[in-house]
Structures are given as C-alpha cells and as structure tokens.
Image (spheres, coloured by chain):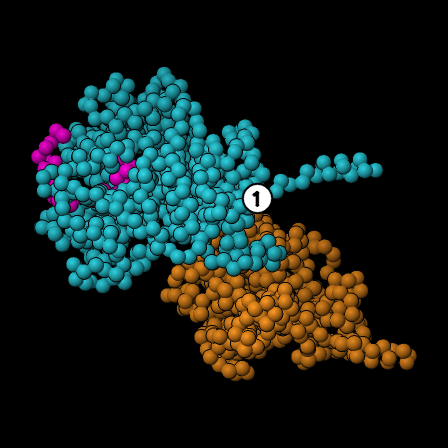
Chain colours: A cyan, B orange
Amino acid sequence: MESFFSFRMKRVMKTDPDKRPQDVNMSQWQSICYEGQNLLIVAGPGTGKTHTLIYRVQRKIQALSEHQKILAITFTHKAAQQMKERLASRHTNIDEFVFVGTFHSFCMDLLRKYTQDARLPEEFSIITEQQLKSYQSIFFPDEKAQEIRRKLREISHWKSTQLDQDNPEHVQAYNHVLRQWGFLDYDDILRETVLFLTDNEDIAVQISQQYPFIFVDEYQDMNPVQHALLKRIIKKGSQLTAIGDPQQAIYSFRGSDVKFFDQFEKDFPASRILSLHDHYRSAANLLQASQQVISARAACDVPKLVSQIYTKGQLIHHISPTDKAEAEYVVQQIESLMEGTSMFSHDSGRVDETIKPLVSFKDIAVFYRLNHQKKLIEQALFRSGMPYQTSGDCSPGEQMPVYDFITYLKFISGLGINTADLMSLVFLLKAVTKKDQSLTIKEIQASSPQTIYLAQMDAWLDIRRMFRNVEGVQFFWSELRRMETQSRGSNFQEVFDNVMKSQDWNVVLKGNRPWLERLEGLRRRLKKFLTMRSFCDDVLLQRAEDSDDYAVERIHLMTLHASKGLEFPVVFIVGCEDGILPYRREGATDMEEENRLFYVGMTRAQQVLYLTQARKRYWYGKKMMNPVSPFVTSIESALKDMDITPKKQNKFKSTEQQITLF
Amino acid sequence: MKFYADFHIHSHYSRATSKLLNLEHLQYWAQLKGLQVVGTGDFVHPGWLDELKEKLEPAEEGFFRLKKEYANSGPAPVPEKCRGEVRFMLVVEISNIYKKADKVRKNHNVVFVPSFRAADLLQQRLDAIGNIRSDGRPILGLDARDLLEMVLETDPLSFLVPAHIWTPWFSVLGSKSGFDQIEGCFGDLTKHIFAVETGLSSDPPMNWRLTQLDPFVLISNSDAHSPSKLAREFNIFETNFDYPSIYQSLKNKKNKGFKGTAEFFPEEGKYHYDGHRACQVRLTPEETIKQKGLCPVCGKPVTVGVMSRVEALADRSRGEKSARWRPYHSLIPLPEIISEAKGVGPNSKTVQNIYHQMLLKLGQEVYILMDAPINNIEKVAGDLVAEGIRRVRTGDVNIAAGYDGEYGKIQLINQEDRKARAGQLSLF
C-alpha cells in the first residue's frame, strides 16, 4: 500500500543534506541526523518510522567507504521488499550499498556461503512445518500427535531463546535426524549462524567491517538469538540504529522479549534514545480511542502521540445477535462502503444513501484473533461475490504445491536436492501415473545419498523399480531429462514457465484454483532474483504473514498478529468479546500482550474502524455467550458509535401468540 | 446475409436474473424477437460453461447451435412465422473494481471468444485470481487493462468491448467511477479496443459528440436479465454468417458488413437527466449548471446523469455527426407500444394476448417494429397499435426523461388520441 509518506517522498528533490526536507518533522530530523554511535528510536504507530529509517539509511550511504554496505534488518519479508522498493526509487544500484532483508535472509546468505565451515549438509533445505507434520513419525517414532506438537513448540522456543552448545537430549535427537535428511528448520538458520560466528571470530570481524551501519526494525520483538547475533556482528566502530515501539510487542509466545528494548543503553553503550510523537495515520478520534486502550493496561506511562490528521474518522461498535449475523454485518457494511458492488444492491436500496469516501477492495481489512474465526467471514464474502484474500495462516512454502514445485525447479536447474525432497518428485510421479502406490520416505532414504543431482540420478538411485506403472515412470523420467536440457541456456523465468506448462504439472494443476493462484504468485516475484537458488531460498524463508502477493485487488482477511506494520483506510476487528480478545486459554492469559495486540489492530485503521461483537457464537462446537471485550470498554463512549442489530423475531413464538388469540 | 445479433446478455447464474435464462428459453425468445445471433452470457461461470458444453454444438466458425435433442424443449412451440435458425456466441460480462491513479474505478466489460478452448483458458486465468462461482458476472479486483491482456492471450480472435460506457456507477466513462478517456482505462492496450457499447443509457448521437470515440464502432445490446428482454437493443450485420466475419466487420476501418444498431430511446434510462428522486426534481444539464449542481428543494448536490456527463466530455456540438457514423433505429419494445395503445400495463393479459397474436400472424417482433406494413399491423392489432408503431418509426415520441434512478416515461398515445379513436369507433 502506498502510504502518505512514500507519496510525499517522491516529490522531494535533492537538496542540501543539512537542511531539513519539508516532509520531515523536527523529531524525525533529529533521529535522521544523529551522529553518535548507537541510536534507539521509539516510534509509535503512524509516526513515520519507515520514512525516518529511509532518510537515515540514505544519509549513511554517503558515509560508506569502498566495499562497505549498510545492513537493514526488517521483521518481515514483506517489510524488506517495501523498504527496498522505496530505496530503489531514490537510488540506482541500491543493492550495491544496502542489504535489506530479514534476520533469516541475512543468515541464510551466510550459511550458503560457509556451508562447509558451519558443518551443515551440502545443499541443505529448509523444512516447513507441513513437512515436519508429515514426517513426524520419523522424528518422534513413538509419540502421539498432540505430544509431538507440544515437543516441537518446546524445541522451537528452546532454539530461539537458548544458546547453550549442549542441547538437551530430545533437541539433539531431533536435530540429528533433521541433518541426516539434509534439513535445517527455521530456527536453526539464526542459531547455526550465531554458533558459527562464535567459533569463527575472524568472520564476525569481517562482517562487522563490511557492515559498519546496521539498522534493525521492530526492535521490541527481538528474541535472544537475534540479540546474540547482533552482539556478534557489532564491533567497535559499528553503528547500530534500532527502531521500535514497546507498546507493539506481540510475539512473546515465539520467544521475543521486550526486555532487549529496555536494556538497549546497557547493551550498546554510547547510545541515545530519541522518540517520534507526531502521528500521521489515523484520524484524531481513532487515535484518541487507541491511546485510551493502550494506556488502560500498559505497565508504564505511554508516550502521548499527537495526531496530525485533521479529518474526523468513524469508530463503530456493533453488536450482533450471533456470529453468523456478525459476518453478514461485515459484508453488508463493506457493500455499503463500496457504494454497491453490483447493480443489484444499488437498485434494490440495500445500500444506504449517505455519502462516504469511495473505497476499493484493497482499502478494506478484516482482523481476527484466531484463524478459525475467519471461516464465517469467508463464507459470507464468498456469497457476496466480492474478492478477498487471507494471509497469515501458513507460509508460502507450506502451501501445496509450492514446495514440490520449487524442488522440481531446483532439480532440473542442476541444483542438488536432499533425500526428503525426493518425496516431491514421488508426489508428482504418483499424480502423473495415477498410481496410489505408497512409497515411504524411509524406502527412498534407504537407497539414496544425502544430496542428489539429476545428472547422477541413474548411477545410484532408481525409484523407477518401486513403481509398477513402468511406462508412466519412464515417461516421467524422460520428461525430467527433457526439462533439464531445455532449461540449460534459458533464463530461469523461461524455466519456470516451461515447468508450469509441462505435461506432468498440467496433470497436477488442472482446475486446481488455489494451486494455480499460488504458482502465479511465485511467478510474479521471480524477476527480482538473479539465480534460481536465491529465488528458491527466498520462497522458503517467507513466513505466514508474507503470503499475500497478488496482482489483483481483494479485501484483506488476516489475524491481528499479521496486521502489524500495515495500514488500511477501513478496518474491522471481529470477535470483540472477553474470551477472544483477550484470548483466554488454559494457563495464564497475558493481559498486557493481548491489550497490545488489540492496540496494534486498532492503529492500522486510517478512517473507519469497526469493532464487532456477537452475543452468541459457536466456538469449537460449543455455544458461547461472552461479555464485551474489556478493551472495547476502555474506550470512552463519546468516541464510539453504537450500532446494535436487534435479535430476529422468533417466528414460531409470534404464530403461537396469534393462535392463542383465537 | 443480413442478420441481427444481441451479444451481451446474462444467464440464470447472474445476480438478479430470471430463473428462465437457460439456452432453451433463449432459443425460443430469440426466434420470437427475430435475432439470429445471441451471446451466451456468463461463460466463465463453471456451472454455465458446463451447461453450454453439454447443450451446444459447433456450427459455423465461432458459432454454436443448440443440439437437436434440446432444440424443441422451449416453453411453447414457436409460431411458424417466427421460426428461424439461432446461433450462440461465447460472451461474458466482467465487473472490474480497482484503484487506478488513486481513484476507485468500477467498469464493466464484455468479452468475446471464438471457441470453448479460449473460454477455458480465460476461465482458468480468472479462476486463479478471483471468485467466478458466486455470480455469472464475476466481480474482480482486476485492472481492466490487465483483463484485456488476458483476453487477448486466449485467441487472436478474442476481443473486449467496454460495456454501457455511460452508466454512472459501472462504466469506463461513467461520472461516478469512470475515466475521462478510454485510454485512461486501457493505456498501452487501447489500440486493441475497436468497439464500445452505447448501452440503454445512450444512443449514437450522444456518443458522436466526443471525437475521442471516433476510433470505436458503436454497438448495442440488450444486457437482458430475462429472456423476454432480448433484442431491446441489437446490432445489424450484412456479412458472412460466422464469428470471424463479425469480428472483421467490427474491426476493419470502414466497418464493412456492420450496418448499424437498433437502440432504446436513451431518455427512458434511469439516469438520463440530473435530479433528486426523493424531491421529484428533474434537471437538464443546463438547468443543473444554473442551479450550481444543487437540488432546488433540499439544497444537496443532485445525482448527475448521463447527459451531463456527455456534455462535460463533449467536444462536438449537438447534431454533428462522427466521421464514422452508422445508421441507427430507435425502438420501443412491442409490448410497451401495445400497452400504451390499450392503456393497460405491459404485463397485463390484454397486452400479452395481442402481442402473441401479432407474433402468430405477422412474424417476429423486430420485423413488426421495423418493416411490417402498417396496414397489416392495423388488421391484426387495431389502429392505435399501428399508429404507435408508425410514430416510433418516425420518432414522433414524447418521453419524460429518467433521472436519479427513476425510469423515463414514454408517451406514444395520449388521451386525445384515444378519445378520437373511440369516437370513430362509436360511429360504426
């Protein structure tokens, strides 16, 4: 989404570097120009965080010597892309001066470069959660599914918070199998990098010299491993700029710890803390409401933001009788906001006549606390025919058939794949030969080395014999070969297209709308990469919140967590009930973090914010009647427009009454 | 050969359409109306496309005909004088809603493809990016330019026509969410647009006022939401009877083979003039300017209609013709004329009886409206109906123009006409 700032930025002309540009306010300017060693910028929502960062990065580019670069680390893949685009619009060859990426993409580059020194499997691959699920019997032979999930959560938490060399036994056992298969998991990427740099101080020094200026975004959501990584690559002479907002820390369940924010001055001496106060996103009354929400439960005083938006926004608190009615209400409101997406709704008077700003699909977002809440909203939207997209449920690499497709691409491009990746070929083979023969990963592993190249395939492995449909398999094999020959000498966009058009993939993709859609999505990002390898790595490094890259406009549906960093003219937060917001589960509920999450959601809205609530809903099959969310209650009533859909008249009752009349 | 074609219609899979919009009813009504070529509508809808594949078979190139086993399962036998061959063409309307140049754009586009292969390809592409299952006319967040690109990639003979280009809410030049230029919408691909649809809300002279529309041939379709509304507007061809010939006659510079259109009186449309329905205020474009765009009753801005929009974009004066003008006929549907003559509603039994009598004895509706000798009509339907048709043919029609969602009101036959005839009758 093009923000207010990027729009204004384009108009900025090159001027005297010591003169404050028109689109920069005083406190932003102070942060941009700060020349001391380390800087922590406290930036509330809508205060022009990225805008300030970009100016500061630009300024630091002038200070680079030869062979030096700026390292800019963002929290999400999506944020990295946006930042790169904005920088690229003001600088040619931006890649020569700045590395913009997530912690993971930065570490991945390092690990690919030093695979052997880090003692990692050659051509290692990143395992997706989906794969973990399907191979769980290998990792945890004797455990029940629920127990495995718990263990995996525990391992992940351990890996992102502990840096001891001595892994507990169960982590060690799990890691052993993982490596045997040629896999790293998502947490390993950071952890292995930190361990590698600890053992190889010389390389850490090299990196610190290469990257004298380091920028870290969303500093409130750092976990201990990320923090350790920073400590390794920040040496004397490095300058760190961290930016974040402790009121938006929402990832403690993943191991993030806001304490790193608080101890910044201790960790990085010779530092200064500056803050940004002027708010440029939400209408003043919406900002006031969200400030009331965050102040009600914050551990310490919340710095006051000053709105610079002078239009009046709308905050609607709506109560529906049921969760289904809530979903219908959302769709009706969207239709009305769009001033009727169809002639039908316009002519039949379903759309009210008040004049509202025209909005388009991409201007509208619906947030929910938990993924399973979206089902009813999706159904209602589907019936309306309006286009929508969901993001935040699973990462691109986990969505069928992305991983398999990527594996295929790697394989025919001459890159190595690991044993488990062979399952992707088996998947395709099964689909093509229409044989439902089970070929387990164990059977494959028994006869194959850790890294497999197409060129050597015949020499040591023959899964052909394991399938009975010999002709089908033979054809499949010759196709693989043909694709490989064809891809030699073509650029990898052509390779991608060839695979998509190939007969085998056609069989799999035919009429499968979501699958096609995903591959179309991949195809669009392809041109940003120089090699097939970096493209494939990049796809697998993306997390759930990154997966909404579409060329068409749609209404956005996402979890509150995934909404971080985004902004929309119109926002709905559904399920504003105690039990959902805050989400109360067994064990302790972290009221403060839930409150911050709600605050993050509210502060995404620019003009219109709906907080909707249902008196009655079905929650995992049980009927539930919840009181209103305490977060909604902390907004004073003068700021909220109440809108209550009355319960429908019970038809049966009224006929009964009529009958008794006679 | 000479033939009539109505391309843009809908199936029963579209919102707010008749349940009877199936191929059998279309075939039946096309014959009563006098059309030889009818669009299928809605071909990207999976249910409808399946029905089309099941019930149609290839005929002349790019044309399809109803298979024999379905051909006679219409609601009633077709009167002998109306019978004729009917061909179908694969056509769909898409609703595009998106932001461009920082403004919300909503426009409808009619897409033509010559084969099921091309239809499948387009369906697949659209299926991957949006919901094509809930509405026969899918609503997509897709830039119309990008839709055009996808269409062109399906087949060299596939093409796209911007639909009813003056409708305020949903069209390429509409006042509410349109562009000021066709090029603003289709950008670098504008050269692939060669026709635009005038829609019920405009007629050719209104479109001739804009030199920017000179490169496009003006076509007209009924946009029917029920089978009896077919042929409200249609196109006249005199060329070979197949899809490529239609394509060529629309595309070639001189539009050889395309003989013009039959049109609604645009004043009948719901948004012809400006005004406020609630305040019962109807304003011409000039009056609106005098009122500074405000309603004289309530003081709020009036809903601006099609005429005002045309005036705003026009660069030719009224009455001037475009260099590429085609002849056109202004028509009023026959049941409405009978209704006027008889002074009863168009759906009344009286009107329907006379209507079907006329079809039975005279032939197809379009023939009756345009070509049948007046005295033959008089013999079957009486002199008031004949007089009505004569007046429509000569353009002697009074219409109180529509505004702000209120349909325009036709007056063909007034009380005095009726009294005069009644007087004559009583003499006998």
Using the rendered view, name the quadrant where residue A14 is placed. Answer: bottom left
Using the rendered view, name the quadrant where residue B76 is placed. Answer: bottom right
Give the chain of mark 1. A
**Residue at image x 86%, y 80%?**
B424
Q: Is residue A242 left or right of residue A585?
A: left
Q: Is residue A536 left or right of residue A501?
A: left
Q: Which amino acid, by three-letter code, is at mark 1?
A: Ile
Residue A391's place in the image compared with A4, above or below, is above
Instruction: Identify the magenta region.
Output: A198-223
Q: Position of residue B341 (x, y in %)?
A: 77, 72
Picture quarter with the C terminus of chain A: top right
**Residue at image x 34%, y 28%?**
A132
Q: Does residue B387 appear anywhere in the picture? A: yes
Residue A242's place in the image compared with B230, above or below, is above
Q: Position of residue B370 (x, y in %)?
A: 67, 75
Closer-to-camera residue (A596/A166): A596
**Residue at image x 72%, y 78%?**
B390
Q: Position of residue A394 (x, y in %)?
A: 38, 37
Q: Position of residue B80 (x, y in %)?
A: 74, 64
Q: Among all residues in the image, which is located at the extreme top? A: A142
**Residue at image x 75%, y 76%?**
B413
Is residue A202 one of those drawn in magenta? yes
Q: Does residue A379 appear anywhere in the picture? A: no
Q: Is residue A187 left or right of residue A307?
A: left
SS class, disc 1 = strand
Closer-to-camera residue (A515/B258): A515
Per the image, the residue denoted by label 1 is A644
Q: Among all residues in the image, which is located at the extreme right? A: B428
